[in-house]
Amino acid sequence: MHIPDGILPIPITAGGYAATAAATWYSVRKIEQQENPRRHVPKASLLTAAFFVVSWIHIPVPPTSVHLVLNGLLGALLGYFAFPAILIGLFFQAVMFQHGGLTTLGINAVIMGLPAIVAHYVFRMRRLGNHDSRTRTAVFGFFSGAVALGISVAMFVAILLGNLPADFDPAIERAAVYTLAVAHVPLIAIEGVITALLTTFLRRVQPELLDDV
Amino acid sequence: MKLELDEYVHLESPLHRWDPRYKLAGLMALILAFSFVRDLRMLLPMVAATATVYLVSRLPLSFMLRRLRYPSIFVLAAVLILPFLAGQTIVLSIGPFDVRQEGLLAVLLIVTRFLCILTIGLILFGTTPFLTSIKAMRALGLPAILADMLLLSFRYLHEIGNDLQRMQTSMTLRGFHRHRLSPRGLRILAWLGGSILVRSYEQSEWVYKAMILRGYGHEPHPRDEFRACSRDVVALSVFLSTAVAFVAADVLWRYGPAALPW
């Protein structure tokens, strides 16, 4: 779900870079407002690498398999570090595996990163009323994973179809949007389930991971 | 796990010798100029410029071909979808499918731009050690927190990747069928991911303590290790001029001389 180089016109890629610069600046500013901001850097960095590696785990969806996006979980666990972490992950993917691209790094970061920040706030809602249980962690974990991927898919489809250098027939375009949306529904559900399972696992094994960063 | 990014950084070529900061600026300018191109007449000069830079870099062709494996899926998808669905002018009918001129031209533009940008990106990071590239980005103004995160993530990426491989091998040896979708299978895969996150989190505590002992956060700002010479500046001027020429020529072809700002 990364837009490669060569597809989007320069105003969109430049706009993506501008939005990414603004979001990164805002995140770094928020991080620097924390007490001893450097304390969290090694943690966020190793978790960034770990998220990158965990996204290589293939989930079987017969007859094929999919890999996890995990931007919802990233937002839930890393908070304001999520946007820089996603930017770094996308940079690694573009440079090492040629997934995505250098010109589309900004717009891809927006597609993945802004929903991660939404997921951060969704996951924080589990504490409303000072009542945090295993079920609430699972439910809000599910929604943070599913909502983040759902928003990312919607942004991806809208940006991609709206900016191809060729005109689609409106009927074909509508059909493509519906097909892509329907095809992603099981993936959104799987992402939500895995995020719920992961957050409950972390709550049991390393609860400070859910609260610390 | 081998990521092989630095495989050919030891070669000798003008691009290998170029100051990494100037190389980053020059090649990124060329990449942005390529992404600006929309006129089909600019594609041939774009391919020629890319091939020339690749030849000068002395990177072997196999380096590029190997790295086209994943992106080729995208190229295939574009070739299979766009000519049949995009545009109105039918140029050929294959059974129930109509091949449309606008779709064909869009594929030509997208795929050529994609391959040229990808190749320049490979040259950029294939001729400089990755850590040096990050230092060059820092020297060009990347925020310190981002540079630290990039360096640390890259440092532990291989290690955590190897952990995942080991754990997956252990799971397979213990009879886990990773190709079967079941609630139990999903739970086990989630726990696998969770274990990786927990191990990394615990390791980060030790890493932080080790970094503090070495003065992290209190060290003076390191001096820029790069020293540019006049050759680097000339090379940057050549690349910037080429990038500007591409943009100007594309505007000229598409809108005529009146559209140029000078």
Image (cartoon, coloured by chain):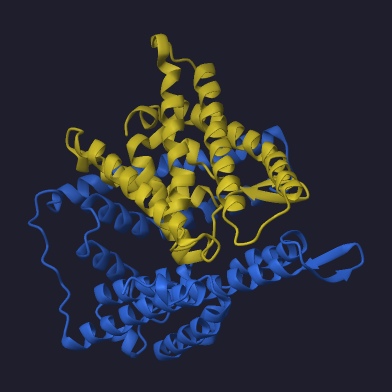
Q: Quadrant of residue A76?
A: top left
Spot occupied by residue A8 in the image (x, y as percentages of width and height): 52, 59
User: What is the quadrant of residue B10 in the picture?
Assistant: bottom left
Left or right for A155, reference A90:
right
Left or right? Give the position of B107 relative to B231. Answer: right
Is residue B1 shown to the viewer in this render? no
Q: Is residue A211 above or below residue B12?
A: above
User: Which residue sits at x=54%, y=43%?
Assistant: A155
Determine whether B50 is above or below B221 in the image: below
Looking at the image, which is closer to me, B53 or B86? Answer: B86
Taking the view exactly as shown, the residue that stands out farthest to the left is B220
Query: How many marks can you see?
Result: 0
Q: Position of residue A60 (x, y in %)?
A: 70, 46
**Direction right: furthest residue:** B95
Judged from this view, the residue extending furthest toward the front is: B258
Identify which residue is drawn at 70% across, 66% down.
B103
The quadrant the C terminus of chain A occupies is top left
Q: Is residue A191 visible?
A: yes
Please tell me the colour of chain A: yellow
Rendered location of residue A174, percent (x, y): 72, 44
Front residue (pair A146, A63): A146
Q: Is residue B114 above or below residue B218?
A: below
Furthest-top residue in view? A129
> Is residue B213 or residue B3 the one in the foreground?
B3
Horizontal side of residue A68 vs B4, given as left or right: right
